[in-house]
Image (cartoon, helix red, strand yellow):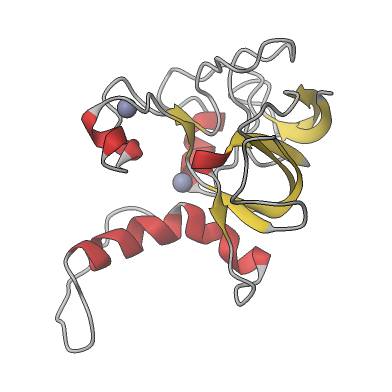
């Protein structure tokens, strides 16, 4: 059954976000259905809402810092079960065949990852949606490969901003093996 979902959507570049109802897809064998508890506000959300890049499709539901609780899983899903605390970040699918995808670097997917909102949605058949819709909503259905576990030690509201802003800043520190005693400079361009 498709999942009736309430959301806040932008309907034009100038209108404020307004209530919007739509259906999430019926969870497939590899899908995780999530009740969204919190969604961070990323500055990218504002750029897309205001059509700053010139390619926004309306109506659009922003939000790619998503934290919530699993409400259903498909038959192939072993990593998650109902009640688990989970997160979804900036992407919900990718080609899974290119070199970056095979190396676990799906964010560099050559044909392009499927972004959490605003991407053409190949799995939206039957929902009436042409594009993916994001986390300013009550529920989302995401392939298990693009869902992460949130440890019990991190409150869901604190976890949400880690899914984009947090990982964007943490990733280079980890890549360069920054640790105690390291000297780093953080360039103050942009929100991160
Ligand atoms: Zn973001
Ligand atoms: Zn790929």
**Residue 8 at x, y = what percent?**
74, 35
**Residue 72 at x, y = what percent?**
77, 42
Q: Quadrant of the C terminus?
A: bottom left
Q: Is residue 74 visible?
A: yes
**Residue 189 at x, y = what percent?**
27, 55
Q: Is residue 172 left or right of residue 124?
A: left
- Residue 127, placed above or below residue 116: above
Residue 191 sits in quarter: bottom left
Residue 152 sits in quarter: bottom right
Q: Is residue 6 left or right of residue 61?
A: right
Q: Which is more toward the observer, 35 or 168?
A: 35
Tell me the residue at 41%/28% (across/down). 94
**Residue 146 at x, y = what percent?**
50, 41
Tell me the residue at 61%/35% (across/down). 142
Q: Which is more toward the observer, 64 or 124?
A: 124
Q: Is residue 37 visible?
A: no
Tell me the residue at 46%/52% (across/down). 164
Residue 151 sits in quarter: bottom right
| Count of picture labels | 0
Q: Quadrant of the N terminus?
A: top right
- Residue 91, placed above or below residue 178: above
- Residue 63, placed above or below residue 186: above
Q: Is residue 22 left or right of residue 53?
A: right
Q: Which is more toward the observer, 1 or 183?
A: 1
- Residue 91, placed above or below residue 169: above
**Given the current orientation, which residue lies at the most extreme bottom position?**
181
């Amino acid at each position: 059954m498709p999942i009736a979902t309430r959301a806040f959507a932008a309907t034009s570049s100038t209108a404020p976000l307004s209530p919007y109802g739509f259906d999430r897809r019926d969870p497939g064998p590899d899908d995780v259905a999530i009740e969204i508890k919190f969604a961070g506000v990323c500055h990218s959300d504002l750029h897309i809402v205001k059509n700053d890049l010139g390619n926004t499709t309306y109506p659009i539901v922003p939000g790619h810092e998503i934290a919530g609780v699993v409400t259903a899983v498909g038959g192939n899903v072993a990593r998650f079960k109902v009640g688990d605390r989970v997160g979804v970040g900036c992407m919900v699918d990718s080609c899974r065949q290119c070199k970056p995808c095979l190396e676990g670097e799906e964010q560099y997917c050559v044909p392009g990852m499927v972004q959490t909102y605003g991407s053409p949605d190949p799995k939206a058949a039957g929902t009436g949606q042409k594009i993916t819709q994001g986390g300013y909503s009550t529920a989302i259905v995401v392939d298990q490969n693009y869902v992460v576990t949130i440890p019990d030690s991190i409150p869901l509201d604190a976890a949400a901003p880690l899914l984009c802003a947090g990982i964007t800043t943490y990733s280079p520190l980890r890549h360069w093996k920054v640790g105690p005693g390291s000297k780093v400079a953080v360039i103050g361009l942009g929100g991160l």
